[in-house]
Amino acid sequence: MSQACPWRRRILFVLPERGVLRGQVVDPDGAPVANAFVYFGGQARARGDEPFKPFRPGRILDGARSGADGWFELRGEGCEVTAGHERFSSVTLDAVRASRIVLGARGALRGRLVDASGRALADRLLRLDQRKDGPPSTTDAAGRFAFERLEAGAHAVWLEGQVLVGVRLEAGEERELDLTVPALGTLELLLPPGATLAPDEVRGVLVGREDVFGFYHEFAPGSAPDMLLVPHSVLPGRYWLASSQGVVAPLTLAPGATRIEFELGGAVLRVRSTQRVNIQVVPADADPFLRLAAARGYVKVVRETEGRFRVSPGRYALVGEAGVLLREVDVPVEGLELE
């Protein structure tokens, strides 16, 4: 009686067909996931171009659902593929690697809400991601709150219409936070020499780069022509400033600081286009949330109107609407011109 060879393995080849992508969606343990939603493009297609929007499959009209065995057939073309499911974290990956899509686990965000003196704040309604209709959590007598089954990515905790904090979660991460309700405050941004801004026309964002971060998209004129105000008590940490007038810069805010003077890079990046495009510049290693948020402070580029950015020599990403990655560029000391 013959015996099976101990080294024998079963291999499945998925043959490509132009305009058709076939693959399988599995959970973190490798088990097939039925009814997963798969489509070409990044997560902004299903979430919209505003930060912290939830995943909404109904926005996509050309997607496909996986069967009971996790297999799907997606028709169309694109560089990226996204898959999502209500029990797992959504995943975006290059289309050439999408024959097997592993969804991420869900996580949680828990903690305490206290005032500046450390006193627990009870019966306070917090909302996650959306100011008015996001998932709610009311603090208990000890000030504790909890948001469960969260997707990987950036989330915001809101209190009384204001963002308390932003949090970046990895797939399956469960993070504990002590949140302090900030006192009223203002951050003064002192513009460097050569930075010409009309404060009443500035549209921009100050986006934190830490795992626990601040996110601010309101600017006001300061008491001097070279000053902008962020009318909030700003969390300390590393930030990227992006504005509609091409002023972009990294900032680091120390605890307790209420004023910061930043420098602009010595290289000039000029961008021209025959068609209108909204564009912004971010570090090449920016995560999807930073790209999405920075794009809200876009610079309009069309024909005779060029986009002009002063940056330090290095590698940067040019992003368009909804934070879509347009291209990466290396900017030398002498600057760079792009058509």
Image: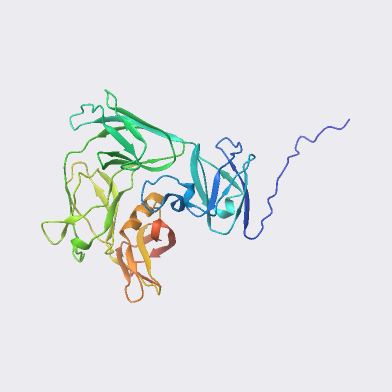
Picture quadrant of residue 124: top left
- How many discs mark residues in the rendered view? 0
Q: Residue furthest top?
A: 141
Residue 181, horizontal then vertical, whole percent: 22, 36
- Front residue of 83 and 178: 83
Picture quadrant of residue 75: bottom right
Q: Quadrant of the C terminus?
A: bottom left
Residue name at image x 33 percent, y 32 percent: 137
Residue name at image x 68 percent, y 50 percent: 14
Residue 318, horizontal then vertical, whole percent: 39, 61
Q: State how the image is colored.
A: rainbow
Question: Can the viewer see residue 288?
Answer: yes
Q: Is residue 336 above or below residue 324?
A: below
Left or right of 157, for residue 82:
right
Residue 241, horizontal then vertical, whole percent: 28, 55
- Front residue of 103 and 253: 103
Residue name at image x 33 percent, y 55 percent: 294
Q: Is residue 321 above or below residue 108?
A: below
Residue 49, horizontal then vertical, whole percent: 38, 54
Q: Is residue 263 above or below residue 212?
A: below
Q: Residue furthest left?
A: 223
Picture quadrant of residue 256: top left
Left or right of 285, for residue 198:
left
Q: Quadrant of the N terminus?
A: top right
Q: Residue furthest right?
A: 1
Question: Can the viewer see residue 173?
Answer: no
Left or right of 92, for residue 117:
left
Q: Is residue 293 above or below residue 332?
A: above
- Front residue of 172 and 52: 52
